[in-house]
Image: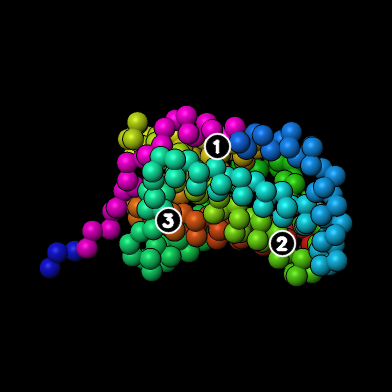
Amino acid sequence: MESRRLVLPPPDPKWSWWDLVLVLVMLLALIPAAGFLKNYIMQAISFLKVTGNTPQSLALFLGTFIQAAVIMLAVSLITRHRQGTLKDLGLIGDNLKHNLFLGVGGGALLAVVLWIMGIIVIWIFGPPPPQDIEVLLTGLKTGRDLLLPFLAVGVLAPLSEEMYFRGMVFPVVRARFGPAAGMLLSGLFFGVLHMDIYRVLPISAMGFVLAYFYERTGSLVTPIIAHSVWNSVMLLIMYVGSNQF
């Protein structure tokens, strides 16, 4: 009996290098826009405080929501302009059950491996400065306060980042340099754009593995789920560690 083929590489990209740059330009435009809209954002935070969430949680959620919305809008517009489809982005694929299973298991394993890498980095270089989200989590008192941070880093960030980094960037780099170099270079690009010199290697390693998941399945479902699991596990670890005393 012929075994079912599992290796389904992503399709040839419909995007160019300039399209990748255009998304970054739209993201960079958020910096002056945030300054211009600061008062409106603060008013929104003040209004939403009635939900019982802390201003820090609301700021994180709104910031992530705006960034994710810009990324997804930019990717969607470029895909439509290039006459691409959801399948070209990897959002429609075969064997959904297998992709979900691989995403959950791969994300959990990724969390363990990168946690160990973080310990090694701390052992060699010493503890890095805390991330902004770690500082935020120290002010949370109950598990309910985790809802908005979870939606931000466990749902919105993985979905939007995978649409760009694996859905657009990886296929373009892969087409130019081949699968292995494509995974390596797109992973490094992913790490550098997080702009955290202390964590660039673990994040780049994460980007490499997520690109491998996309290469293995031809579907963004797997890296999206794996990314979400990884972020959620680390969020929970940081919350427990920040509030254990």
Horizontal placement of 6 versus 173: left or right? left
Of the 4 image quadrants, the one containing the N terminus is bottom left
Of the 4 image quadrants, the one containing the C terminus is bottom right
Of callouts 1 and 3, which one flags the residue occurring earlier in the amino acid sequence?
1
Question: Circle 2 — which element?
Answer: helix
Of callouts 2 and 1, which one flags the residue occurring earlier in the amino acid sequence?
1
Give the residue at mark 2.
148
**Amino acid type indicated by mark 2:** Leu
- The image quadrant that residue 144 belongs to is bottom right
Horizontal placement of 227 versus 134: left or right? left
Of callouts 2 and 3, which one flags the residue occurring earlier in the amino acid sequence?
3
Q: How many marks?
A: 3
Task: Give the Cα separation between the discs numbered 2 and 1.
Answer: 26 Å
Q: Residue at x 41, y 37 (%)?
A: 15
Q: Is residue 98 above or below residue 161?
A: below
Q: Is residue 10 magenta?
A: yes
- The image quadrant that residue 14 belongs to is top left
**Amino acid type indicated by mark 1:** Val
What span is colored magenta in the figure? Answer: 4-25
Q: Residue at x 42, y 55 (%)?
A: 91
